[in-house]
Amino acid sequence: MKFLKIFLLFILGSTFLFSSVTLLKKVELQKGELRLEFDRSYDKKQIRHFTLKNPYREVFDIKNTHLANSKVGKNLKSSHCRSLRVAQYKKNVVRVVIETGRSYACTPYKPLFAYRSYHIPLPKFTIDNTKKYSKKRYKKTKKVKKTERKSKKEQAYLVDTNKAKSFKYRKNELIVIDAGHGGHDTGAISGGKREKDLVLQIAKRLEKQLKRRGYSVYMTRKKDRFLKLPQRTRIADQKDAKVFISIHANSVPKRSRNRVHGVETFFLQTTRNAKSQRIAARENRAVLKGAGSKLSKRVIIDSVLNGPKIVQSNKLAIDVQRRIMTNLHSRYKGVRDGGVRHAPFWVLVGASRPSILVEVGYISHPLERKRLFTPQYQKLIAKGIAEGIDSYLINRRKEIDF
Ligand SMILES: [Zn+2]
């Protein structure tokens, strides 16, 4: 079974995923240059070159490109720069960073007759890499050491400035909150309570929590109105949101309503461009007709269409689920942790970013329903989701750290 999976993955992967994407095959240092080699002739427009300060870096974002394998661009060292980094920055963007700490005239070029190459000159000056800290970092370390002796008040001030810093950072990070259902679509109904009302209340609390932390927030709906699926994800795509969170509540038929309860978080496998969507639709159909367990089919579809994003969605889901549970358990007994799961047939949803769906509880369960409609319980859920998003994004920043 495992072999079959890998095989199918390979076939689908090579046919659909890589056919339209440029592969970065090699990155090497030669004659004072960083030389990139692609698997085919590329378009110069694919490469965006810009600089970043503190510390000074030359940055190259190469669009519609994948690293050919995990070894590409690893362990590059040069005495002309502090560090050289190459990474799959986004799903289809490879980022190359040359950290020099000082500006220099960097004029990259596509060599004549070498259509698959891109050469980036490194600075002429050399850098003493034996110094462990850059000036700035060194200063910081000294400062931290000093504060160990400083008064509590001063320490609190430092913590505050750190807070202010992350606050500023978060301003540029848009979170889309999607309250499920709305309008004529009530969602689940139980004991006279409607899912659409509950999820809107929680969404609003989450909005508050996130804004308090400094994030930019967009709500797909702020009142009781109906939205189609594409309307929900469109804004996330247009504004390049960092995260898409959909909030729902669950329900089961009468006979099991006293048994089933708890919080579950699903992560979605999604894809933005129409072509992949068509492929997804077709592959969904084709693959699903074949033999094998449901899970393996899902695994194949996901990996082919959106491998890296799925990993991120999964991480986000884990963080969010964990924080919701911690918050709820701090005040309530017996809340079941339903864990993180895969949402199988959401391939076509549309938002091409870490996307999760939180089922905050079962409104069919009498006790859980009661709790769900209290402000305190809702606040704990909202706080949990916000903390989860925050911890995910902080880790994500560290991961990329460019
Ligand atoms: Zn729902």
Image (cartoon, rainbow, N blue to C red):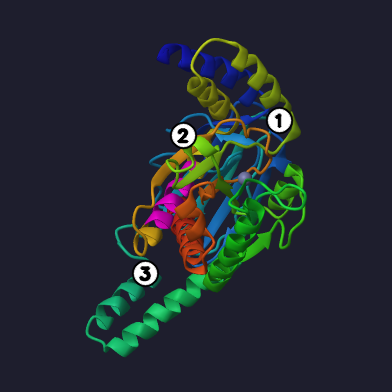
Q: Earlier in the sequence, mark 2 or mark 1?
A: 2
Q: Regarding mark 1 in the picture, which secondary structure is present there?
A: helix
Residue indicated by mark 1: 277
Q: Regarding mark 3 in the picture, which secondary structure is present there?
A: helix
Q: CA distance from mark 2 to mark 1?
A: 29 Å
Q: Residue at x 42, y 80 (%)?
A: 160
> Eyeballing the image, is 295 above or below 348?
above
Principal SS element in the magenta part? helix
Q: Would residue 215 be seen by someone viewing this image from the given angle?
A: no
Residue indicated by mark 2: 72
Dot 1 crowding, Cα within 10 Å, few <14, some 14–19, many 20+: some
- CB of mark 3 within 8 Å of CB of mark 2? no
> Eyeballing the image, is 12 above or below 389?
above
Residue indicated by mark 3: 137
User: Which of pointers 2 and 1 indicates the residue nearer the eye?
Assistant: 1
Q: Which residues are magenta?
A: 314-325
Q: Quadrant of ligand 1?
A: top right
Foreground pick, 277 / 64: 277
- CB of mark 2 within 8 Å of CB of mark 1? no
Q: Residue at x 65, y 26 (%)?
A: 40
Q: Earlier in the sequence, mark 3 or mark 2?
A: 2
Foreground pick, 390 / 109: 390
Q: Is residue 116 magenta?
A: no
Dot 3 crowding, Cα within 10 Å, few <14, some 14–19, many 20+: few
Q: Amino acid at mark 2?
A: Val
Q: CA distance from mark 3 to mark 2?
A: 28 Å
Q: CA distance from mark 1 to mark 3?
A: 46 Å
